[in-house]
Amino acid sequence: VSESQVSRSSSPTGRPPSRLLLALGVTANLVLLGWYKYSGFLDHTIEAWFGVDPGLPYVMLPLGISFFTFQQVAYLVDAHRGEAGEYNFTDYLLFVTFFPQLIAGPIVHHKEMMPQFMRQTWRHHRWVNFSTGATILLIGFFKKVVIADNVSRIATSIFTAAAVADRPLTIGEAWTGALAYSVQIYFDFSGYSDMAVGGARLFGIRLPLNFHSPYKAASITEFWRRWHITLSRFLRDYLYIPLGGNRRGKPRRYANLMVTMLLGGLWHGAGWTFVMWGGLHGVFLCANHGWLFLRKRHGLPPLPRPLAVLATFLAVTVAWVFFRAGSFEAAGRMLHAMAGLDGFTGWPNKAARVVASADPLKIIPVVIACWLLPNTQQIFRRYRPALLVPHSVDLPRFPNRRWQWRPTIPFALALTALLLVIGMQF
């Protein structure tokens, strides 16, 4: 669909383009996404359920297709609504292909990016942009290489043991694996997001905030306002609300939540375990809204925040098991052991261990740091490192101002130390 078709101003009557053009544009994007990302999943599902091999060819997945497809769909929908301005085709191509966030997000919106491209913001405050962007880029690299990659060895060993099923896991192993993956996926994904924010800032471009200490959330609703914030925004604005949102009664609201989260789970990966992960979060969100309704009706007090944060974190950790396991059988063995149904042994004997007995000690301080330390956005708050997304959580100042980054010698030495630690990983 060309720019002249999707721009509101191109319509001679001043009205948005027809629904047919919107349907064609959205369908074209979703068909390409479905072919490249889900053809293999469909092939395996038909063969498993019906015993028939459709023989669909193997196709390589283009990098970042899930992200730039959603960006294009959002643009088309906004153009149909008359909410997209008139941009030339090269500006549109820059919006879709801007490389810092292309592979792993955040999912950017044309209202955030196009004005920055047109104002040529990279021409201003170049030294501030470079120093801030390079530092955030380095912190994101540290999260990915030093924390996520090291913790992934623990999670991979334990989830592999669950998949192989040579023996039942102990409760200590199962919880260590689940917590390790909770840490891994957060620092992996938020590290990539920080690198995207920092890389874009080198060019004077501010990307939207994508993570804001999600493990500090005191409810599942708050968790999704802190975790992958730009995806939550897309699902809310372009799926949940068009389905009816909460405007058509509580049963319809819960059904809309479930549909949104099931499709959100499938977007993350072509597998039924991802759908299950999305379904679990849909159930959690419905339970969250139901609890809020009961509290309001009966005047019940909220849970103390530390207890609510712990309960939310445990629920999220349990759901991550399906996200990581790769099969329902492996996920079932993990959850069976986590529930203590295979016994309450903390750690197996030395000959049976798949990870060292000291590995849990590496995870605990990282989880505590997620709860107690400021995040990247709070550290760089005075330099406004990322755009705030409407309807997400507020970004309060961290109480201790000594954590706020400044271009000083102590911070330069701290970053040099980070760089040395990163270098030691190679």
Image (spheres, rainbow, N blue to C red):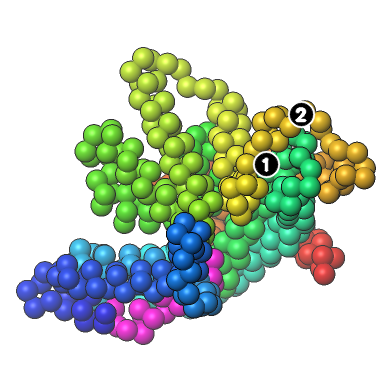
In the shown orientation, is residue 236 left or right of residue 426?
A: left
Which disc number belongs to residue 285?
none
Query: Judging from the image, what secondary structure is the residue with disc 1 in?
Result: helix
Q: Nearer the viewer, residue 393 or 265?
A: 265
Q: Vertically, is 233 above or below 18?
A: above
Q: Nearer the viewer, residue 10 or 135?
A: 10
In the shown orientation, is residue 384 left or right of residue 370?
A: left
The image position of residue 204, as x and y in percent, is: 51, 72
Which disc number belongs to residue 343?
2
The image position of residue 420, as x and y in percent, is: 82, 65
The residue type indicated by label 1 comes to: Met
Instruction: Say which quarter of the image contains residue 13.
Output: bottom left
Query: Which residue appears at 78% of the width and 64% of the height?
Result: 422
The residue type indicated by label 2 comes to: Gly
Query: Which residue appears at 33% of the width and 65% of the height?
Result: 74
Whether the magenta-drawn stretch holds residue 419 is answered as no
Can residue 344 be seen by looking at this rendering?
A: yes
How many other residues sit within 10 Å of disc 1, few (<14), some (14-19) or many (≥20)? Answer: many
Quarter in which the N terminus is drawn: bottom left
Query: Which residue appears at 21% of the width and 81% of the height?
Result: 4
In the shown orientation, is residue 233 left or right of residue 217?
A: left
Q: Vertically, is 328 above or below 1?
A: above
Task: Name the residue carrying label 1.
Answer: 334
The image position of residue 87, as x and y in percent, is: 29, 78
Q: Nearer the viewer, residue 14 or 235?
A: 235
What's the magenta region?
Answer: 87-105
Whether the magenta-drawn stretch holds residue 95 is answered as yes
Query: Judging from the image, what secondary structure is the residue with disc 2 in?
Result: loop
Can residue 410 be seen by looking at this rendering?
A: no
